Amino acid sequence: MLFSKFSAAAVSSSSATLFLNPQNRFNFAKKTPSIANPLLCNSLRPIVEWSFSKRNCSRKMDASASSRTVSPRASAEQLKDPDQLIDSVETFIFDCDGVIWKGDKLIDGVPETLDMLRSKGKRLVFVTNNSTKSRKQYGKKFETLGLNVNEEEIFASSFAAAAYLKSIDFPKDKKVYVVGEDGILKELELAGIQYLGGRYEDGEKKIELKPGYMMEHDENVGAVVVGFDRYFNYYKIQYATLCIRENPGCLFIATNRDAVTHLTDAQEWAGGGSMVGAIGGSTQREPLVVGKPSTFMMDYLANKFNISKSQICMVGDRLDTDILFGQNGGCKTLLVLSGVTSLSMLQNPNNAIQPDFYTNKISDFLSLKAATV
């Protein structure tokens, strides 16, 4: 399976040692993975060293890869000749929120643009940091919006979390505590991983503080996965905190650290990063981030579709996730201004993340083509 081809090496660590026994099962150590630089969110591949003993082998990850800073790039060029960009790549990876839709409203010109790219033989892939839905559920959303997108073309951070746990041979006798919604639960179930928590189990639970009260938690939880959660509460914060702080080797995994998201097309809403930040604050731990800009999903996609990364164009509306995701993967990048990033934000002198090109929305592929005819 493709899961087995990816290891913890796809996610950077500043002080982690992962032990594999002869049966190639993951053994929880006292030291757990963390990230030195939250901006990069484990987006750079670490250096991996192997040392062998009679009983096991240890994999040590160099912190230098995760502590690098973003180097300034040349200013982005406004897209004027879409044909040149289209002809230079084989695959387009699209973010969804702010690129394809806002909330439940399709952005103008998207169906025609996708049809044009497919007619030119381009592979289209859709990658989203939103973990509230599984790939199957996102497939239904595309269908509802009138877009013909195959489930195999969709990659959500909920899927990435399950894929990462499979890649490190997460023990079958361990459980995952989920702070998040349906998408994470469904992907963990499909991957055959035990879980507890989530929207329905803990969404309405409250803590009644009394003298001498101590909250219990499951000592078999080996990982806490945190994603966007509209039913976030103090019970979940405390339960996740206990698991991470008290269960030896418990992983702290975030689907993303997005500051804001598009729940409606009327305004921006607090994103999954707010949930991750709360638990990071109580545990004093940095999470392993499996969504953009981590290269885990990029490596997974390149392997699954046998794509050369230089033949990919990443299209997104966020500089610190979408564009950095593409740049870390060695892809061409196109920023669209239909989402969270404005032209003034892009051109701010303090902004070091510059895409190759920028344009207003993806339907500019059509309007700019027509203008040059």
Image: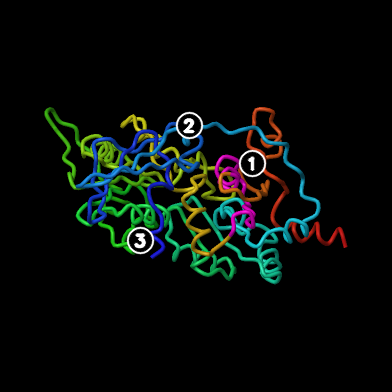
Q: What's drawn in magenta, residue-wise?
A: 308-327
At a point 48% along the width and 45% down the height, the residue shown is 294
Which is in the foreground here, disc 2 or disc 3?
A: 2
Q: Earlier in the sequence, mark 1 or mark 2?
A: 2
Q: Dot 3: what SS?
A: helix
Instruction: Name the residue that disc number 3 marks.
Output: 186
**Residue 59 sits in quarter:** top left
Instruction: Name the residue that disc number 2 marks.
Output: 67
At a point 31% along the width and 51% down the height, the residue shown is 198
Q: Main secondary structure of the magenta part?
A: helix
At a point 71% along the width and 39% down the height, the residue shown is 343
Amino acid identity at mark 2: Ser
At a point 65% along the width and 32% down the height, the residue shown is 72
Q: Earlier in the sequence, mark 2 or mark 3?
A: 2
Above or below: residue 258 compared with residue 162 = above
Q: Is residue 88 magenta?
A: no
Between 339 and 312, which is closer to the camera in this rendering?
Answer: 312
Asked if labels 2 and 1 touch by Cβ distance under 8 angstroms, the answer is no
Q: Dot 1: what SS?
A: loop
Between 37 and 338, which is closer to the camera in this rendering?
Answer: 37
Amino acid identity at mark 1: Thr
The answer for how far apart the CA atoms under marks 1 and 2 are is 25 Å
Amino acid identity at mark 3: Lys
Q: Earlier in the sequence, mark 3 or mark 1?
A: 3
